[in-house]
Amino acid sequence: NQTLTTPALIDFVDQFGAMLPEDVCTYVGQIHRRNVLRNNRLLAQLEEAVVAMNGLGITPIMLKGASTLATAPEERRGVRIMSDLDIMVMPEEAGEAVAALCAIGYEIDYRTPPGSQRWHVDLSRSQDVGAIDLQQAAPGPAYLYQSLGHALNHCVPALL
């Protein structure tokens, strides 16, 4: 459980449950069910954030777990534990994106100082199960992306 991979064991339990101790199957099943509930709440939170940004003409890009959550079939939503929603916006849209999220109740927990090499803002609301990590660039060194052009040209739209 310290590696946050317990819910992913549900596939193993489903396939080999008859050969495993009952308490192990019960435990993994319970963790998976709870994570499904949590991730459903994260998905609702993601949908609300996307709608708020779309309302200002911003097309956010889901990164990491947020992209998985936005595209995973319903039966697969509970296999990954997530603590936040990583979302990227174009640098020129960052201020408006923060304003859109603050307008629906988010508060800024942390913002990188002006002139930082990698800009991001952590936003949260007390009623949510996770925070939003709003970014202007994909993770990793910028040189990995410099020849790719506009990020949205490499994305697949997801209907939430």
Image (cartoon, grey):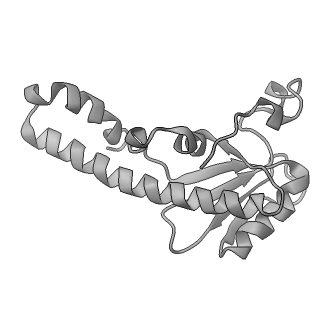
The location of residue 72, given as percent across then percent down, is: 50, 38
Quarter of the image with the N terminus is: top left
Instruction: Give the residue displayed 81% in from the left and 37% down from the top.
Output: 152
User: Is residue 111 in view from this perspective?
Assistant: no
**Residue toward you, 20 or 100:** 100
The location of residue 59, given as percent across then percent down, is: 78, 49
Q: Is residue 84 left or right of residue 99?
A: left
Instruction: Give the residue displayed 66% in from the left and 44% down from the top.
Output: 62
**Residue toward you, 110 or 55:** 55
Q: How many marks?
A: 0
Instruction: Give the residue displayed 71% in from the left and 67% down from the top.
Output: 101
The location of residue 128, given as percent across then percent down, is: 51, 67
Q: State which quadrant residue 74 falls in.
A: top left
Q: Is residue 142 left or right of residue 76?
A: right
Q: Is residue 60 left or right of residue 30?
A: right
- Is 143 situated above or below 69? above
The location of residue 68, given as percent across then percent down, is: 54, 39
Q: What residue occupies the far front of the structure in this picture?
A: 159
Q: Is residue 114 left or right of residue 109?
A: right
User: Is residue 117 in view from this perspective?
Assistant: yes
Q: State which quadrant residue 55 falls in.
A: bottom right
**Residue toward you, 139 or 112:** 139
Instruction: Give the residue displayed 44% in from the left and 52% down from the top.
Output: 39
